[in-house]
Amino acid sequence: MLKLFYSPGSCALATHIALEDAGADYVSMRLDFGANQQRGTEYLAINPKGRVPALVTDRGFLSENPAILLFIAQTFPEARLAPLDDPFTLAQVQAFNMYLCATLHVAHAHGRRGYRWADDPAAIAEMQRKVPQAVGECFDLIEREMFAGPWAMGEHYSICDPYLFTVAQWLESDGVDLARVPKILDHRRRMAERPTVIRALAAEQG
């Protein structure tokens, strides 16, 4: 059985939703970031990165949302969460998710975990000040160029959609002007109505 390690409010929600989308048999393990459980010996033995999500499989653990989401799509092909028979389109799916992971999420993290990049309080404060602009520009690009509609990659729901929904939860706290991203907001609203999303959110909030 698959085992998902997550923390509420984190990017692990994307994987949580995808497991529900796939109808996977899994258990979820909540980590309390407030108590620094992600840095505890027990969890570091599973995921030395000390971050979430981590998905434990019968072959070992996986980390990083783009990798885990693709694993779920390939393990449960009947769920049709990715264009597995089209190498180019599948690469586009991966490019979308990697942008969320490597660019947008990093811009977001500068507002909360500036200590990863600087020790000077003034430098950390400057990173925090820059977040609305940096994250806003990422969402501008998604809104203008990357979001195909009605789902992230076009007509078919995919592993990009739970990931986009997850990072879109941070729009308000990152100070992004919502008027800039009407398509993303509509996508967020429609995602929130999906039973799989409702179940994943309920599990994380419970």
Image (tube, grey):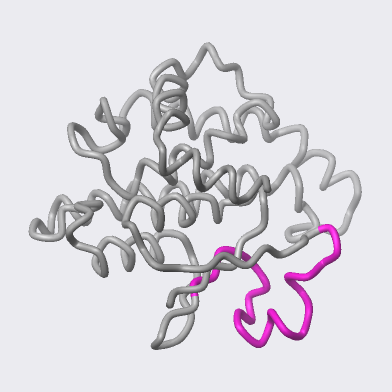
Farthest left residue in view: 85
Q: Position of residue 191 (x, y in %)?
A: 41, 32
Residue 74 quadrant: bottom left
| 19 or 162, nearer to the observer | 19
Q: Is residue 159 left or right of residue 45?
A: left
Farthest top residue in view: 179
Determine the residue positioned at 25% across, 64% down: 76
**Above/below status of 201 relative to 30:** above
**Above/below status of 162 relative to 35:** above
Q: Is residue 113 left or right of residue 69?
A: right
Farthest right residue in view: 121
Q: Position of residue 83 (x, y in %)?
A: 16, 53
Q: Position of residue 119 (x, y in %)?
A: 86, 59
Magenta region = 34-55
Residue 98 magenta-drawn? no
Determine the residue positioned at 45% across, 68% down: 26
Q: Position of residue 61 (x, y in %)?
A: 48, 80
Determine the residue positioned at 45% across, 86% down: 60
Determine the residue positioned at 62% across, 67% down: 29
Q: Quadrant of the N terminus?
A: bottom left
| 93 or 190, nearer to the observer | 190
Q: How many marks?
A: 0
Residue 43 magenta-drawn? yes
**Above/below status of 124 relative to 175:** below
| 73 or 148, nearer to the observer | 73
Q: Is residue 20 left or right of residue 125?
A: left
